[in-house]
Image (cartoon, helix red, strand yellow):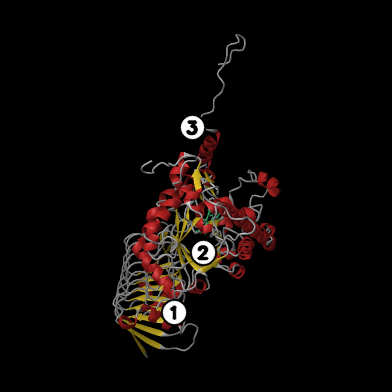
Amino acid sequence: MKDTQNNIPRTIPQQSATFSNPINAEIRRAAATGIYDIRGGGAKRRVPHFDDLLFLGASISRYPLEGYREKCDTSVVLGTRYAKKPIRLDIPITIAGMSFGALSGPAKEALGRGASAAGTSTTTGDGGMTSEERSHSTQLVYQYLPSRYGMNPDDLRRADAIEVVVGQGAKPGGGGMLLGQKISDRVADMRTLPKGIDQRSACRHPDWTGPDDLEIKILELREITNWQVPIFIKVGGTRPYYDTALAVKAGADVVVLDGMQGGTAATQDVFIEHVGLPTLACIRPAVQALQDLGMHREVQLIVSGGIRSGADVAKALAMGADAVSIGTAAMIAIGDNDPKWESEYQKLGTTTGAYDDWHEGMDPAGITTQDAELMKRVDPVEAGRRLSNYLKVMTLEAQTIARACGHNKLQNLEPEDLCALTMEAAAMARVPLAGTSWYPGKEGF
Amino acid sequence: MQVFDLEAEGLRALNSSLHELNGSTEPGRWEIVNPKGSHAIAVGLDAPIEVTVKGSTGYYCAGMNKQATVNVHGSVGPGVAENMMSGAVIVEGDASQYAGATGRGGLLVIKGNASSRCGISMKGIDIVVHGNIGHMSAFMAQAGNLVVCGDAGDALGDSLYEARLFVRGSVKSLGADCIEKELRPEHIEILKDLLARSGADAKPEEFKRYGSARQLYNFDVDNVGAY
Ligand SMILES: Cc1cc2nc3c(=O)[nH]c(=O)nc-3n(C[C@H](O)[C@H](O)[C@H](O)COP(=O)(O)O)c2cc1C
């Protein structure tokens, strides 16, 4: 109550922590439009992550390797279990599956060029394989998705690996979404659908359900490709112990595990923010499953979802992954959300770093669009060079850490090299809280 | 004619022998004996050969077929001719779930009955079933023709795109956004051709046509109850 005349102290207006301004704005938006918020990207909320871990480094009990002189191997071989031709990569960082349709042709080409220059693989997506990405990627992983858009045996045979996508970290249990605005003639043709309609691809595969069927499906894919190429199974992080075990049982060569920070081209915000496990919480249960089956390092584990730096790479590897995969970071490296487009982001009612309406196809950076003019903003050669620079920096960073911990191979990093800054991270990563020898869940402390 | 004893020589030997013919234009004839319900028989073929399987098969028989004609003198397990590109697959007996799933071309003929999800997500294949089909058939079917001489189960053509569905008998229920449509002369022509090629004893005029109402193509909040 305002009573200036009598000079009575007044109550300061108080915002609710529960009904905050962003929450209230969302309520008003929903009330006005009658549709949930759709966006791209991964979970934006803060969750326990690699930032909550630190490396211990060598000292008296362990000795380090010389930074610029002693070798630290970064290579990795994926698909050693069954494939006649496993994938050999120079660095343990791969480019995750992002569909042509979600991304423009030049953006896909840039990913292929950058990855190839850095000695790693790229992955197709929910929309089939384009000739551009095949020709610009020395190692290309072909995704086998529920929608089966563009699926055909010729592309299957010219792939270097096949990735059966069961789920994604951003939307475990959800299907794909490509809205009408982005369906150009070429995209429509590749997907055998009319132009301009919303494409909501299925969340389950059309011709198998459950791990026993999956095993037979994998047999079929191997027979079609004459057991030449590795078969990956990609799952969103939900029940990583059991999903990893079942993927191994179904015959995977490689398990790809994507945590909730993992990006998507478009899905409901409520899905992105409220379904799935943080990447940090996925890794140890998955590695445990591999170890329990005697398959750790036999079946390789690729982890994705919020990988940004060489430190993140090193941490994922120290927890037992064989390699990591990046989506969002690769997009940023080729120009996504670049401050140079700030005035255009403003016009779209957003700002650099926050732009996530990738489904609308109006991306000022020309990456998540099918608009012929906008996509010219990506020069595939120049953007490819930036991606390869970035991949090399991440690799050097990871090597720096590995050498400091005394390892001559990135995969030799181990949980004992790590400690956690928070109780949550300690519990999820199963490494001791900094300065202690304990983590929640550890027996007999 | 080549006779291949699957039980004696194994699946890998079978498919790799058949793949050695891929790309060739020579017609050849193969007979596979003792299939005994094996999975992934004659998958990934790409030559104008004729393969006859003497008995019943497991999952994914003739998966991703191109050019070849595969006859099954028996019944087939789930996913027969899945993602077929071209050629023909003819099943004398019945088919389990997801027959012709995601098929992009060619002709699949089931002379007996097909089970649930027949033609799921089909993308251009023609499927002719002489008997009945099960529930959720042609779910999210995008393109091609599904012809059913008998009856269809529940939720036919749910979330259908542009595939055409023709049913001679009864339809237990239609799925979301699937409606009956007029059978026009061009559809009679399509039926005439498919019925003749598949050896079905039925007249085009006896069929009803079903297709997409196209009401769910772009999201509209007032349609949420339809899903
Ligand atoms: C624009 C975009 C498109 C994507 N498309 C696909 C896809 O088609 N198939 C798929 O399995 N995952 C897709 N993903 C998920 C990525 O493969 C990967 O799991 C995720 O981006 C990893 O997390 P990160 O973005 O934090 O690196 C997409 C992600 C983005 C950002």
Q: Which residue is mark 1?
A: B45
Find residue A194 and report its horizontal and vertical position in percent: 53, 63
| A144 shown above or below A406 | below
Which structural element holds mark 3? Answer: loop
Mark 2 CB lies closer than 8 A to ligand 1: no
**Measured from the top left, where is residue B55 in percent x and y?**
29, 80
Q: Could you give the CA–CA distance between mark 2 and mark 1, rounded to whole angstroms?
A: 26 Å
Under circle 1, the secondary element is: loop
The reply to whether dot 1 and dot 3 touch (C-beta < 8 Å) is no
Mark 2, chain letter? A
Q: Amino acid type of disc 3?
A: Thr
Classify 10 Å Cα crowding around label 1: few (below 14), some (14-19), many (20 and above): many
On the picture, is A91 further left or further right than B57?
Answer: right
- Give the mark toward the camera: 2 or 1: 1
From this viewpoint, which residue is outermost toward the top? A6
Give the Cα distance between marks 1 and 3: 60 Å
Residue A18 - label: 3
Q: What's under tag 2, amino acid-wise?
A: Leu
Where disc 2 sits, the SS reads loop
How packed mark 3 is, by other alpha carbons closer than 10 Å (few <14, some 14-19, many 20 or more), is: few
Q: Which residue is mark 2?
A: A193
Q: CA distance from mark 2 to mark 3?
A: 43 Å
Up/down of B49 relative to A340, above or below: below
